[in-house]
Image (tube, rainbow, N blue to C red):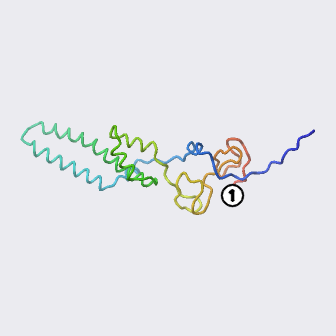
Amino acid sequence: MAEIQEPQVKKQVTESINPLQRIRNRRREKFRFSDEIRLIPRALASTVAGLYLTILAIVIALNWNAGPPVFVMVAALTAVSIFVAAYIFLIGYVNRDAKRRGMSPTLWTLLVIFLPGTPVSGCVLYFLVRAPLPFNCPQCGSAVRAHFNFCPQCKRNLRPACPHCGCEVSERDRYCPNCAWELASPAQP
């Protein structure tokens, strides 16, 4: 007796994927050091530079008659100041970066400052758990958080997935790259 086979019908792309697959397929953020440095507030940089110059002037004024050791003290003060300034700039960066990623800037700033352990343990924690950057919806252009499946303004599916295996696919794909399931015909540009 011959088995009756169902005709293969082109399936529409489903609207959800497995959260673990989303983590693996997270959009790669483009990292430009010059763009990241601009997140540090200029007022903070000016304040740190002013404090350094003030402390440097006080140390030189108090030890001017001491002779050559003044230069040793200035060198030691400069070395310590570089590390302190880097830590202060890191706190300023975390505050601004958390804000642009939709995280609580106050909470993360306080965690970076007061987390026990080394002074940078809060920063390491922040960089491990920070949310991805929001992106613009390709259809309407509104800002959308990276974990959204649909645009809240126009309901566009931002994470199309194969209906057969659940693997994330591109809207341009004709076949699923994981299981070769035939998807709906790609839209013509």
- Across and down, in percent, residue 14 comes to 68, 52
- Across and down, in percent, residue 40 comes to 35, 52
- Across and down, in percent, residue 25 comes to 57, 44
Whether 54 is drawn above or below 139: the answer is above
Question: What is the total number of numbered labels drawn onto the structure image?
Answer: 1
Residue 59 figure quarter: top left
- Across and down, in percent, residue 104 comes to 42, 53
**For the point 10% across and 46% down, which residue is it?**
61
Q: Is the C terminus in the top left, top right, bottom left or bottom right quadrant?
A: bottom right
Q: What residue type is labelled 1?
A: Gln
Whether 60 is drawn above or below 157: the answer is above
Pointer 1: what residue? 188
**For the point 22% across and 41% down, which residue is it?**
78
Q: Residue furthest right?
A: 1
User: From the viewer's perspective, is 24 left or right of 126?
Assistant: right
Callout 1 secondary element = loop
Q: Is the N terminus in the top left, top right, bottom left or bottom right quadrant?
A: top right
Would you call the spot at circle 1 few (<14 residues within 10 Å), some (14-19), or many (20 or more)? few
**For the point 40% across and 53% down, which residue is it?**
105
User: From the viewer's perspective, is 79 left or right of 30?
Assistant: left
